[in-house]
Image (cartoon, helix red, strand yellow):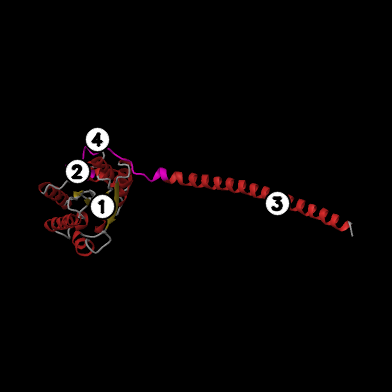
């Protein structure tokens, strides 16, 4: 009977020792686990930062000073330069629309890319092309077609479908259609800059030349800036002009460059 209390004491000591060892081991595991978790969080955080960095580098719009804009846009008309400068000073983008025939599409796309780069993303360009007469465009597409005028275009460059009008729409009506486009642009943005560029020249143009000359005279009389790219092409009487367009009178690469270079030179002064 005397040995029983001694046995109980020994057993208690052993149990306490086991419990102490288990507790120490558990605390060590917790400490180790905590260190591993912290290391994993650091790796994840670095990965996120590294993945986000390239996006942040490409997203900002380059801030151009008034002097920068004056130099870049030295060849612009006063109204267009004023619109660009006003939007830039207000921290706003400039929304531009180019609308005309399908022949203009490639030149407009190249122009849009160069302008975006040169103006540091300040100017965004939408392109809308339609292969039809100006009469059909005004009747069917101007207000209910693929152009979202609610986008609020600050600059509108219009190619008035003169080649499609050839023999179908008289000169006076083409000019009325041009004014209809201008008035709609002004109804959505009060201080909009409205510009005109003629369609492409064609070989042995004939009466088409009369239409083009009438278009230039009309815009000049009305004080509408006219971006004349024809000087970049061979003369309409020269067979060299045939290499600037295909059989469908669509500009080839040479024609596209001739047209787009004139548009770019108007907006970007060297």
The residues tagged by marks 3 and 1 sit, at their Cα atoms, a distance apart of 74 Å
The image quarter containing residue 118 is: top left
Residue positioned 25% across, 52% down in the render? 97
Badge 3 local density, few (<14 within 10 Å), some, or many (20+)? few
What is the quadrant of the N terminus in the image? bottom right
Does dot 4 land on a helix, a strand or a loop? helix
Q: Position of residue 32 (x, y in %)?
A: 65, 47
Q: Position of residue 265 (x, y in %)?
A: 25, 40
**Closer to the observer: label 3 or label 1?**
3
Badge 1 local density, few (<14 within 10 Å), some, or many (20+)? many
Badge 4 local density, few (<14 within 10 Å), some, or many (20+)? few
What is the quadrant of the C terminus in the image? top left
The residue indicated by pointer 4 is: 67
The residue indicated by pointer 1 is: 97
The residues tagged by marks 1 and 2 sit, at their Cα atoms, a distance apart of 17 Å
The residues tagged by marks 4 and 2 sit, at their Cα atoms, a distance apart of 13 Å
The residue indicated by pointer 2 is: 82
Does dot 1 land on a helix, a strand or a loop? strand
Q: Is residue 237 left or right of residue 251?
A: left
Instruction: State which region is magenta.
Output: 56-84
Q: In the image shown, does 222 or 22 lie closer to the viewer?
A: 22
The residue indicated by pointer 3 is: 23
Q: Earlier in the sequence, mark 1 or mark 4?
A: 4
The residues tagged by marks 2 and 3 sit, at their Cα atoms, a distance apart of 77 Å
In the drawing, what numbered circle is on residue 207? none
Q: Earlier in the sequence, mark 3 or mark 1?
A: 3
Q: Position of residue 259 (x, y in %)?
A: 26, 45
**Proximity of marks 1 and 4: CB atoms separated by less than 8 Å:** no
The residues tagged by marks 1 and 4 sit, at their Cα atoms, a distance apart of 25 Å
């Amino acid at each position: 009977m005397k040995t029983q209390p001694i046995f109980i004491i020994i057993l208690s000591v052993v149990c306490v020792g086991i419990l102490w060892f288990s507790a120490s081991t558990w605390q060590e595991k917790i400490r180790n686990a905590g260190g591993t978790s912290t290391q994993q969080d650091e790796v994840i955080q670095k990965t996120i930062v590294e993945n986000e960095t390239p996006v942040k580098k490409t997203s900002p719009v380059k801030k151009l000073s008034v002097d920068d804009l004056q130099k870049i846009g030295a060849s612009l008309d006063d109204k267009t330069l004023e619109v660009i400068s006003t939007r830039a000073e207000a921290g706003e983008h400039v929304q531009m629309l180019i609308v005309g025939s399908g022949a203009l599409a490639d030149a407009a796309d190249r122009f849009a890319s160069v302008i975006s780069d040169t103006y540091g993303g300040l100017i965004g360009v939408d392109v809308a092309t339609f292969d039809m007469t100006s009469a059909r465009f005004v009747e069917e597409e101007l207000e209910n077609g693929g152009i979202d005028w609610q986008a609020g275009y600050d600059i509108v460059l219009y190619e008035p479908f003169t080649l499609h009008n050839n023999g179908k729409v008289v000169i006076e009506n083409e000019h009325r259609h041009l004014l209809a486009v201008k008035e709609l642009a002004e109804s959505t943005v009060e201080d909009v800059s409205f510009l005109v560029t003629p369609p492409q020249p064609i070989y042995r143009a004939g009466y088409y030349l009369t239409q083009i000359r009438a278009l230039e005279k009309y815009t000049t009389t009305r004080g509408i800036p006219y971006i004349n790219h024809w000087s970049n092409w061979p003369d309409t009487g020269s067979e060299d002009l045939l290499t600037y367009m295909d059989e469908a009178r669509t500009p080839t690469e040479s024609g596209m460059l001739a047209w787009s270079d004139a548009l770019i030179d108007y907006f970007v002064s060297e």
